[in-house]
Amino acid sequence: MSLRNVAVVGFAQLPVVARDEHRMSTEMLYPVVREALERVGVTRDAIDYQVSASADYLDGRPFGFVAALDVMGSWPPRQDLHLEMDGSFAAYYAWLKIQTGEVDTAIVCAHGKTSEGEPERVLNLQLDPYYQAPLGLTPTATAALQASAYQARTGATDADFAAVAARNRAAGARNPDNQVRESASADALQRTPWVIEPLRRGYLSPVGESASCLVLAAEGKAEQLCQRPAWIHGVDHRTELQSIGARDLSRSAGAARAAEKAFEMAGIGSARDVDLVELLATNPAEELIVCEALGVNARATAPVVNPSGGALCAHPVMSTGLIRLGEVFRQLSGQAGERTVPGARRAVAHASQGHCLQQNVVWVLGTERRWA
Amino acid sequence: MKRPVAVVGVGQTHHKARRADVSIPGLVREAVDRALADAGLRHEDIDAVVVGKAPDMLEGVMQPEQFLAGALGAHLKPLLRVHTAGSVGASTAITAMTHVASGLYDRVLAVAFEKQSEGNAMWALSPNLPFTPPLVAGAGGFFAPYCRAYIARTGCPPHIGPVTAASARDNAGRNEYAHLREPMTVDDVMNSPVLWDPIRYLETCPSSDGAIALVVANEDAARKGPRKPAWIKGAASYAEGMWVPGRDQVSPRAGKVCARHVYDQAGITNPWKEIHTAEIYVPFAWFEAMWLENLGFCDEAEGWKLVDRGEVKFGAHLPINPSGGVLCTNPIGASGMIRLGEAALQVMGRAGAHQVEGAKTALGHAYGGGAQYFAMWVVGSER
């Protein structure tokens, strides 16, 4: 089927930090919205639609997103939606809204103040409140179960995890927005202590916070807002059951299905047809599982995986997925600085949320329009 | 709308203060099963699921749609979670509609729920925020000044809230799903204690456990269904900032803009004449008069007069909330979708004992935040 050509035309994010001591979540978002609009050279009035992404539990309060209305420039009143999901899923909805033909442009804003609480305790509350949350399972504990399952099926070793982490850390050193900017050798990472076996301290995302804003525009508007738009070729998202015991943790059926559908929409056979992949993996096992689901060889040199350094170098919950999409835009529009993948013309941006990669979204973007 | 979208299935739970007979998944599944049966569909016919609920603190589960994925039949499907404060049920239904309107989905399931007995809504709705004195008064304490301002501005007399409350309860008596159905007179309401001046105890919505699910579909799928669909003629969601100098909290601009957008899509120029019934979000009785004005059913300062003259009662010119509305049933996150679903049932002619005779066009409406979020649709019996 023929869809509207829609592109990412602008992106801004705050550099990720462990704790932004002096600003509330929405105060962090404000300069990012301003910067994104300045980059596309318009005022808020020129944008038809807005979607925000945040989670009340991260902010430690109900209705955190209501305060975001003010900093998103919601006066006069705007057509609006808020999703309690990572910003990449919010971007999906903005893209869908543009597909209806009712709007041509949208901003997508993600914010989250992870340091307001302890993510290990807060994210436990995502689990089934009757059978799983009371066990005290943390996201690191469920991730360790998944990593073990992956090792049991594939024979992946501690050294394999260390290599994935080291590759991300080396790439991430070139990204000024990252929280962790020191590269680290696989040997050094393999000497860091277990947090929960088989996951070592050096294999886990740091706890960080940020805010991000992405601008989407349909063909006709996109070219006016951006010299080198990153055109959306395909996108799909899927969820799985949460129950840790009810699915094969060693694989991501959801990421695989989303990838299959997104690639079909994009008219590509597999991820081997793209130049780079930005994926949201909070540890090396997740990265290897997602790579398998996307059909990417994590050990090969092409496509390049996570030239930004990925979530192992910066994981501002709610923004991490949107930043993957923003990174792909930066790469395809020539704004990726030292981490530029030369000649990149097509890329995949992935995001996930929930325990053990429960929900996945897969985007395919390119420098050329998808549909004639 | 470029691609027609219709409501083809409606299912809701029986709403109560405490549904101790079901878990959260059980509650949600009750609504989903009823909506699918109503539409003559099975889970495998559904292309995507959209879930809405109010703050996660109400049940103490973060992003509960994740653990509910099984109960929702969402495995390996797209699943989105909406949260737009009190308007969330309505904006969730509209989000599902957008899926179909995009042309990418044929049939989408929209689900909204709240199981308030799992937690304490007063606590969850009384945030202690930086630089803001805590009200510790829940939504009633927050909205009482809005009602006082309306009374001061329009000269609305003190019996209007009680008239609305008693009328809502009368309506709920005809709705088998409603939470509060015991008969109640205007005097009963007048004699109930004031909780937050001017809001009396019996002018206040309850805390309910409940869920609702809708199936929305494209034209082809709608025509194949077993029942007459409700066609969505117009739908929109708007929001405005809180800290805007001069913002009118009593009759917010976002509500007016949203209504105009929806009426324009539906080809409605005179809502008082062209809409036959409306389900509007009235958590505290005074808001009925306020929203009648904001929605353009009458001029400013005329809303309370429509209530006073009995023109919005069941059987009168424009029955408002024939289901009994939020005043009688309030599982917060579901309340907005119940408004939109009830509007759909009216134009399908399947509202049972609370069916408004000859209802061909109906409005469903919800609001949220500090009267900042508005989501509404107009549905009709004809394409």
Image: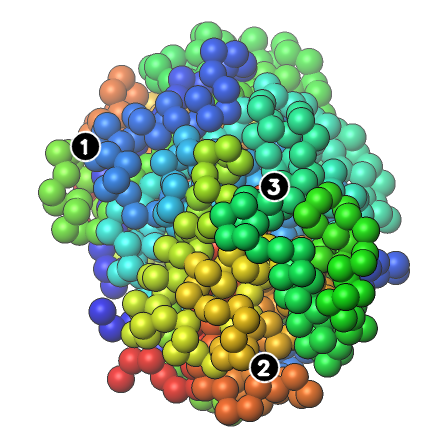
Please determine whether, in this image, residue A234 is positioned above or below residue A252: below
Mark 2 vs mark 3: tell me if same chain.
yes
Residue B251 or residue B298, whichever sits in front: B251
Give coordinates of residue B341: x percent, y percent: 34, 35
Residue at image location 76% in from the left, 59% down from the top: A190
Amino acid type, residue under disc 2 in the picture: Arg
Mark toward the start of the polypeptide (2 vs 3): 3
Amino acid type, residue under disc 3 in the picture: Leu
Q: Distance between the residues labelled 1 and 2?
A: 47 Å
Q: Which of marks 3 and 1 is in front?
A: 3
Report in which chain the residue with disc 1 lies. B
Q: Indicate the quadrant containing the N terminus of chain A: top left, top right, bottom left or bottom right.
A: bottom left
Report in which chain the residue with disc 3 lies. A
Q: Quadrant of residue B365?
A: top left
The local secondary structure at tag 3 comes to helix
Residue matched to label 1: B40
Residue B23 or residue A224, whichever sits in front: B23
Residue matched to label 2: A330
Which labelled disc corresponds to residue A145? 3
Q: Do the residues labelled 3 and 1 touch (CB within 8 Å)?
A: no
